Every structure is written in structure tokens, then in C-alpha cells.
Image: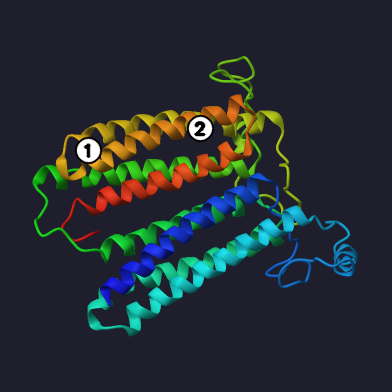
Amino acid sequence: MIRTMHRLAMLAAILAFCVIVLGAWVRLSHAGLGCPDWPGCYGQLTWPDAIAEIETANQAFPERPFESGKAWKEMIHRYLAGSLMLLVFAMGWLAWRGPERLHKFRPVATALVILIIFQALLGMWTVTLKLKPIIVMAHLLGGLGSFSLILWLMFSSRRQFADKPVISVRRMRTPIIVAIIVLGMQIALGGWTSANYAALACPDFPTCGGQWWPEANFSEGFVLWREVGVNYEGGLLDGPSRVAIHLTHRIGAVVTLLVLTTLAFRLRKIPRLRTGGQLLMTLVLAQFILGIFNVVFYLPLANAVAHNAGAALLLATLLGSLSKTSNRAF
């Protein structure tokens, strides 16, 4: 049964990664409000297709005329997210109703079930609150948090190392945890940048608008909660506020690069962690380059989606390395 749990977790991890990447594609292609209602789409289980259905949809939502190219993207994302939720429920059922040796997974499985339900609510609020930035960012973090717990279950249910890690391996737990925290903060900044449409607030690199430190309004740029009922699609902040967000994300990128590359060099010196260190080095450099390309090529969709995927892969790599610092994962 542990093997069943591991296989379910592996399938869920793959699906969660697809949901994260697809969610980025939906958001970056401006399809986040492709369906103005929830959980259906213009009152349909799928999305309007027939001419009569489209006319009815436009009458019901005159402020949001139906666009097929946006609606189907949003609904496919919802279908995949719903499938992921069913997998999470299955793992929760196994942990609670399965054999006694699966009971050790109850805390993680329960936390995952609670988080995935809250994530579904955030998905609903993303639509009903019309892309409110704090909700959009929380939805991104909730997705990555769910992905992390699924990976936790996957690593915890795999075949463990027979030998206990040497002291040099155990000492890497704290640096890896610090790196995860730094990466998490940078991902949150990236989510805030995207939710406020500040990715192109600085249209050049390494300067910003031809200046090393342009006018920036940090107090306004980082107001987390704003009024309800406003349509935030396209962003509402002025230029200096968006510049403040973008600059903070750039600074965070440099800090994250330094922390993760330093960790990667240390991991590569330890045989048990060498593969993770090499992968981490490759991913963090690729992620930094993708971030630069987002600016200099004016946020091409494929590149921006790859940047989101890179963040998820970095998180998975760090969690995988952390699991190897103990003969019992986490």
C-alpha cells in the first residue's frame, strides 16, 4: 500500500506541475476572466459553443463578452485542478482508511486536503473578485504549496536509504531550508509582480527606464489589500508603484541567485547530494536568464510560462535534496 501511496503522489505531483504551468499560461494570456462565473463558464458545464448559447452568455454577462479562446483555456485549467483535487482526496482516504503503516502520512495528507480545498476557494475568488492582486498571488502560492506537500508525500513514501546520512549531509538541512524560504519569498514577489502587471514596468536591463534607480513608490506598490468590486485586469497602479514592485523583484532575483548558487556549489561536493546540486545550479542559472529575457523581449508568452515552470522545478529540486539529508524523508 505504501507503493500505491507513492504512485498516487507521483501522479499527483506531475498533474500539479501541469496545473501550475497551465495556470501561468492562462494568467499570462489574459484569460483569467475568460469565464466570469464559477465553477461553470457562462452558466455552462464546459463553455458556450452554439450560436444561441453564445448570445445567451453575452446577454447574461454584457460587461464580459464571450471569447472562446479565453474561455476554453480557463475551463481546461479548472478541469485539471479538479482532477488533482480528486487525487489528493484519494491520498487522504488512503492515509486515514488504509493499513496502519500508512497512518504516518496522516498529518501531511490532512494538511494537503485542507490546502487543496482552500486553493479551490482561492480559484473561485480569483474570478469573483476580478483578479484582485492579493488573491491572485495567494492562488499562485497555494498551488506551489500544494505541489510541495505532494512532493513531501512522494519523497516520504519512496524506498528509503538503508544507511544513515553522514554528518556532512545532515549539516546541509539548514542551508537547504534557508534556500527554500528565500525561493518562496522570491516566488511571492514574482506573483505580486505578475498580479499587478508590473513585469514590464522596467522595459530595459540592467537599468530601469535608462536609470539605475528611477522614481519608485514602494508604499503604494506594496499595499496588499485594496477595495473589493473593482476589476483589476490590466492593473490599477501608476508607473512609480509598478516600478517599485519590479525593482524589488529584481533585487530578490539577485539575492536568490547568490543563495541558491552558493548552496549548489556546496551540494556538488557531497556525493549523496551531488546530482541535486548540479540540477539546482542549472535551473537557477536558466531561471535568471529567463527573467532577463522576460524584460528584453517584452514578456513573450512561452518564455514567461517557462519562468513560472522554472520556479516550480527549483522548489522540487530543493525539496528532493532536503529529503536526502535524512534516512527518513522529512
Question: Which residue is tagged 2?
Answer: 290
* Left or right: residue 245 compared with residue 155: right
* Front residue of this view, candidates 125 and 20: 20
Sequence-wise first label, 2 or 1: 1
User: Does residue 327 appear in this view?
Assistant: yes
Residue under the image location 50 percent in, 53 percent down: 141
Mark linked to residue 267:
1
* Front residue of this view, candidates 285 and 188: 285
* Left or right: residue 249 compared with residue 96: right
Residue under the image location 15 percent in, 41 percent down: 271
Mark linked to residue 299:
none
Q: In terms of image quadrants, where is residue 215? A: top right
> Quick check: 208 above or below 283?
above
Task: Label 1: state its secondary structure.
Answer: helix
Residue 13: x percent and y percent? 41, 60
Residue 236: x percent and y percent? 73, 41
| Farthest residue, direction front | 50
> Quick check: 99 above or below 38?
below
User: Does residue 175 appear in this view?
Assistant: no
Question: What quarter of the picture does the C terminus occupy?
Answer: bottom left
Residue 279: x percent and y percent? 32, 39
Label 2 and label 1: CA atoms lie apart by 24 Å
* Left or right: residue 300 compared with residue 115: right
Which amino acid type is marked by label 1? Leu
Residue 153: x percent and y percent? 33, 64
Crowding at dot 1, Cα within 10 Å, few <14 / some 14-19 / many 20+, comes out as many
* Front residue of this view, candidates 257 and 81: 81
Task: Label 2: state its secondary structure.
Answer: helix
Question: What quarter of the picture does the N terminus occupy?
Answer: bottom left
